[in-house]
Amino acid sequence: MLSFLRQRSAPPKITHIELDGAEVAVTVRLSKRARSFRLSLPPEGPLLTLPEGARWAEAEAFLFRHRHWLAARLPRAARVRRLDAGIELPLRGVPHRVVASGTLRGRPELCAGAAGPELRLPGAPEHRPRRLYDWLRAEALADLERCSAVHAERLDVTIRQIRLRSQSSRWGSCSASGNINYNWRLVLAPPFVLDYVAAHEVAHLVEMNHSPAFWATVARTLPEMERGRAWLKAHGRELMAWQAPSAGG
C-alpha cells in the first residue's frame, strides 16, 4: 500500500462536516497501529483515526457515512463557535455578552451591562473577530505566565519560554528545553482550570512523563489539582469548540 508521502497530498490535520446545519471540526490523526478507519469522540472533540497509507477520499466517505452517529452523540454545545460581537463568551468561566462598541479604534473593554458582564468590542465588523481573538490571547498569556511563574518557583525549575497555540486536542505541552505551549482557550475556563494546566505543564520540567512521580509533583505544587482536571474532562470539549478566526479575518 502506498504511504502518504508518495501520494499527491497528505490528509488535513482538521476537517469539517456539517451536522444539523452547524459546522463541526473533526481532528484527523494517522496511526501506525490502526487497521481501519475509526471515528471516536474523546473529551477534546471528534477524532477521525486513519491507518497509514489510507486514501483521504475514502476517509472522507467514511466520515460522511457515520455523520448521523456523530450527530447523535455530539452535544450541541460542542458545535463550532465563532468569535464576534453578539455572542456570549465564557471569559474566565463567567458568561460575558460581547457587544459592538460602535467605535473603530480602541481596545476591548470589560464593563457591567444591564443584563450582566459585557465585553465591548471596537472595530469594523470585518475586523471584530480578529480584534477579539488577539485580546483573548493577550489575556490568556498574562494569566498563564503568572500562574506558571508561581509553580516554577514552587518546584524550583526554570521556564525558558511560554507560547500560545490553537491546538484542537491539547491544552498544553512542555519540552525538555523548558519551552511550554498553552492553548489560548484556557482563558475561557474558570481560573482554577487554567491554574491546573499551568501546574501540569510546569511539573513536566521535573518529570517528563505521566508516571506516579509526575502526578505527585503536580499535587506538590497544586494540592487541589483534581478539581481542575475533573472540570476539563467534563467541559473541555465545549471550550475546544471555540475557533480562532481565519488568517484573513
Image: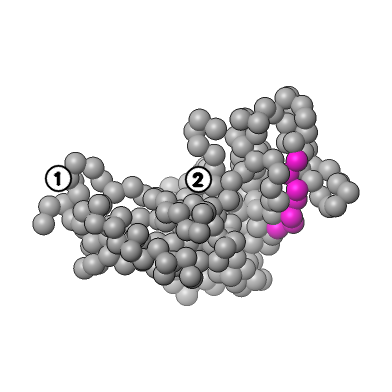
Dot label at residue 202: none
Front position in the image: 36 or 17: 17
Q: Is residue 80 left or right of residue 187?
A: left
Circle 2 residue: 165
Front position in the image: 55 or 224: 55
> Which part of the image, by quadrant, shows the C terminus?
top right
Query: In the rendered image of this protein, does residue 244 appear above or below residue 156?
Result: above
* Magenta stretch contains residue 93: yes
Q: Amino acid at mark 2?
A: Arg
Task: Characterize the local packing of mark 1: few (<14), some (14-19) or many (20 or more) Cα atoms within 10 angstroms.
Answer: few
Residue 70 appears in the figure: yes
Q: Amino acid at mark 1?
A: Arg
Magenta segment main secondary structure: strand
* Magenta stretch contains residue 170: no
- Give the number of the mark in front: 2 or 1: 1
Q: Which residues are magenta?
A: 92-99
Front position in the image: 182 or 8: 8
Q: Is residue 112 left or right of residue 233?
A: right
Query: In the rendered image of this protein, does residue 206 appear above or below residue 162?
Result: below
Residue 37 in the image: state x and y as whole percent: 27, 65
